[in-house]
Image: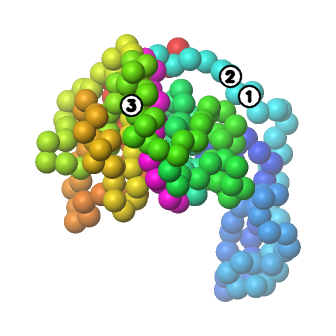
């Protein structure tokens, strides 16, 4: 059962039509009504799961070594929301939202962030290159997630995070990371691909990279 289902009240509903019997979960976030979304017949509630205790409150705990994320012109609201959620799971220190990247001010972002937009510090910036240069002067190591001829493949070797902050740069879904940003980066990382496609959805790729960097070397949150 997904963690989110364990943390909230929900129902299991089932279609009453013998030829359908569609079974599905329903929460207060779903459309109201007792009709089957598949065939339109009536449904019956076969299980009600009620959370008896309050969910654990978010704790502000530093995770070392520090890892931050810079999203440069990631256009999809849902991709950004998903990245927020993965970043919370990894313990990312800060999300820098640059260019056209949507922010939690957009109400649809919460659909995939599922509350992580409230637990991860974030800031909005109009120019990712200006920001990256400023972060460098503050001592940040700039790494990029991009497919290039010289990129290091994740999982081919252990990649240890240095003691000083690392800001991982993730670029636009179509054009990738701005070449000027790549030129600033100390390391460029790529995810190995075994099929016909040469890239993954940006939220999926960012999640894989964050977890590989945080846990691939055996590092655990404090």
Residue 188, given in percent of the width and then of the height, sits at 25, 38
- Under circle 2, the secondary element is loop
Image mark for residue 59: 2
Q: First in sequence: mark 2 or mark 3?
A: 2
In reply to whether residue 74 is colored magenta, the answer given is yes
Q: Which mark is residue 133?
A: 3
Look at the image and give the residue range highlighted in magenta.
65-76
Disc on res. 56: 1
In this rendered view, identify the residue nearer to me: 133 or 62: 133
Q: CA distance from mark 1 to mark 2?
A: 9 Å
N-terminal-most mark, 3 or 1 = 1
Q: Which SS class for mark 1? A: loop
Q: Quadrant of residue 60?
A: top right
Nearer-the-camera pick, 126 or 221: 126
Q: Residue at 14% of width from left, 42% of height from top?
A: 150
Instruction: Left or right? Give the position of 182 relative to 32.
Output: left
Q: Nearer the viewer, mark 2 or mark 3?
A: 3
Label 3 element class: helix
- State the residue at coordinates (32%, 41%): 181
Query: Residue extending furthest left?
Result: 149
Quarter of the image where one finds residue 78: bottom right
Tell me, yes or no, if residue 219 can be seen here: no
């Amino acid at each position: 059962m997904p963690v989110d289902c364990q943390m909230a009240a929900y129902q299991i509903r089932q279609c009453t039509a013998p030829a359908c019997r569609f079974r599905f979960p329903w929460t207060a976030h779903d459309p109201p009504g007792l009709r089957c979304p598949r065939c339109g017949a009536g449904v019956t509630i076969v299980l009600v799961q009620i959370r008896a205790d309050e969910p654990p409150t978010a704790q502000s705990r530093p995770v070392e070594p520090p890892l931050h994320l810079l999203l440069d012109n990631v256009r999809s609201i849902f991709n950004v929301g998903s990245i927020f959620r993965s970043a919370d799971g990894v313990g990312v220190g800060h999300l820098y939202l640059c260019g056209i990247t949507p922010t939690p001010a957009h109400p649809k972002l919460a659909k995939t962030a599922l509350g992580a937009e409230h637990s991860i510090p974030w800031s909005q910036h109009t120019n990712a290159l200006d920001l990256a240069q400023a972060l460098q002067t503050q001592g940040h190591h700039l790494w990029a997630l991009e497919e290039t001829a010289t990129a290091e493949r994740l999982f081919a070797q252990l990649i240890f995070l240095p003691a000083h902050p690392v800001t991982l740069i993730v670029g636009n879904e179509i054009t990738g990371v701005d070449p000027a940003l790549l030129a600033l980066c100390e390391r460029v990382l790529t995810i190995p691909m075994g099929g016909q496609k040469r890239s993954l959805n940006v939220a999926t790729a960012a999640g894989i990279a964050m977890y590989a960097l945080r846990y691939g070397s055996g590092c655990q949150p404090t």
